Amino acid sequence: MTKIKVAILYGGKSTEHEVSIRSAASIFNAIDKDKHDVKLIYINKDGRFIYHENKEIIPVDESAGHVLSLMPATGFMFNDRVLDIDVVFPVLHGNAGEDGNLQGMLEMLEVAYVGCNTRASAVCMDKDMTKRLLTEAGIQVAPGLVFKHFEKNHVSFEAVKNVLGLPMFVKPVNQGSSVGVTKLSDATEFQKAMDTAFSLDTKVMIESGIVGREIEVSVLGNEDLTLSMPGEIVSNIDFYDYESKYVSDDGASLRIPAILTDEEIVKIQDVAARTYRALDCEGLSRVDVFLTESGEVIVNEVNTLPGFTNISMYPKLLEVSGVPYSELITQLIQLAKDRYALNGQLKRSL
């Protein structure tokens, strides 16, 4: 059997560089090597692509690696030869990884890749655009206000509070993993929160705090969707921030699957599926929602390249729903090949 040549692309220039390395290591260890010939491409924090040959562990430096050049309509190159790749499996989180930039580059290289296309990736990374499209589709989201960088010094806490109430969350629009997010219950830290968010993005969103259970659903597929059983983040602290997710051992626990009624499960999965379709997602995404006491399902965000370690919520939810981790990787690679083949049938000229 001819093996599929898969390049795991990891690292990157974003604030989630280390998270990406953990995800890549898990995929590398679990991928079915009887079906796949695995290549490793590390992107350092300066944005250089480093190809490592014949590695049995995930390298996180540039020693013994080849610096790659990128050739449109050709692919990745080094030493005047093209790196033979069938599918790229990107596991870059945050900016320049799941915001459409990388996906656009891979489209230019004309290579198949796992995950959402350029358009969906860009939209889902932008919390403002995500809200607008979901609202248009009749899907409930938290109330929020958006401010551009040139409005930074003209934002009044009292004016925002009058619209959104308390507590409120200040967020950079284009960041993931709760990077740069601050929860506010009074005016004391407002300016500091705004400064933090604007140091990470030129656009900042302030959202109403939603009282409800934090529920997540893993979605897998292109045309036909696999919807996982919902999981729940049970937080032991006031706010589930970046440190709680990736540093602290006692910030929160994951309840997989969540304890829900059959009616709640159906409702949450329906919202997740409609959200996935409304945003034109493909391959995979994790849809995060709030479930309120009154039974409302409010979409919080959509993560197009969620954490992918073997203990991350996305693969764990699918595992308890009947898709083991190694099989999930195999399915995602096939979904990438299917989409690439479909797009290859489209006319490029008249």
Image: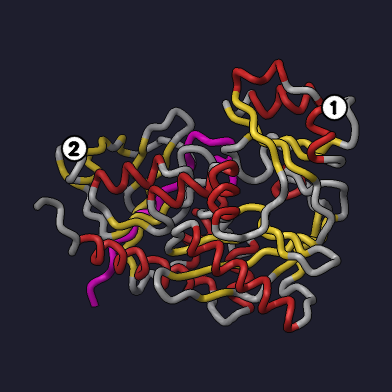
Decide if residue 206 is on the left or right side of residue 328.
right
Q: Give the range drawn in magenta.
A: 1-21
Residue labelled with disc 2 = 79
Numbered disc 1: secondary structure: helix
User: Residue at (59%, 75%) from the top-left corner?
Assistant: 319
Amino acid type of the residue tagged 1 in the rendering? Glu
Question: Whole-percent x and y of residue 299?
Answer: 66, 57
**Nearer to me, 257 or 201:** 201
Decide if residue 178 is on the left or right side of residue 150.
right
Identify the mark at residue 158; answer none if there is no mark.
1
Q: How crowded is mark 1: few (under 14 residues within 10 Å), some or many (20 or more)?
A: few
User: Residue at (82%, 26%) from the top-left corner?
Assistant: 157
Can you tell which quarter of the image residue 173 is in? top right
**Nearer to me, 174 or 160:** 160
Q: Is 13 included in the stretch rendered in magenta?
A: yes
Question: Whole-percent x and y of residue 317?
Answer: 63, 71
Label 2 near label 1: C-beta < 8 Å? no
Image vertical order of residue 66 relative to residue 215, above or below: above
Select label 1 or label 2 by which is in front. Answer: 1
